[in-house]
Amino acid sequence: MGFSVDIHELDGSAIILLKGKLINEGDSLQLNDTIAKELEAGIQNIVFDLTELENCNSSGLNILIRTLTKTRTKNGDAVVCSVNDNLDKLFAITKLNEIFSLYPNQKEALQHFKEK
């Protein structure tokens, strides 16, 4: 399976569902462009739903970190939900679990924005 992205908006936030393997630079650039369009459209809060993401490398993680920085400079935030065991280990090894707010599902991730 390659890589694909599904985006929908809910409660003023963008839900970005990542699918497949985010392991090549072309896919990372595609994701970066997609996120840039959402931010340009005025979205401040982003939920990365990793339910269907099988694998991710440093290029993909870099996009997540850049998005976090961009949303916070716009007084928003980026959070992650539905992390599988494989990616949970990656987040722990890279210490990204200390930078990102991680939630078990979209509903709880969206609640994060309501509480801010």
Image (cartoon, rainbow, N blue to C red):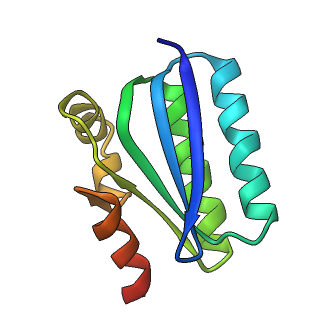
Q: Seen from this angle, which residue lies furthest bottom?
A: 115
The residue at the point 47 percent across, 11 percent down is: 1
Relative image position of residue 29 (x, y in whole percent):
72, 30
Seen at 41% across and 85% down, the residue is: 114
Of residues 112 and 91, the one nearer the viewer is: 112
Residue 2 lies, in percent from the top left, at: 53, 14
Q: Position of residue 17 (x, y in %)?
A: 48, 43
Front in this rendered view, residue 58 or 12: 12
Counting the numbered discs, the total is 0
Quadrant of the snapshot with the C terminus: bottom left
| Residue at position x 61%, y 80% in the image | 75
The answer to whether residue 7 is above or below residue 40 is: above
Q: Is 47 above or below relative to 30? A: below
Say whether residue 17 is left or right of residue 9.
left
Residue 1 position (above or below residue 49): above
Which residue corresponds to the image point at 44% horizontal and 79% vertical from the top-left?
Answer: 113
Judged left or right of residue 81, residue 71 is right
Asked which quadrant contains residue 83, the reply is top left
Instruction: Give the percent coordinates (x, y) of residue 96.
Output: 35, 47
Q: Quadrant of residue 14?
A: bottom right
Residue 81 as seen in the image, left or right of residue 24: left
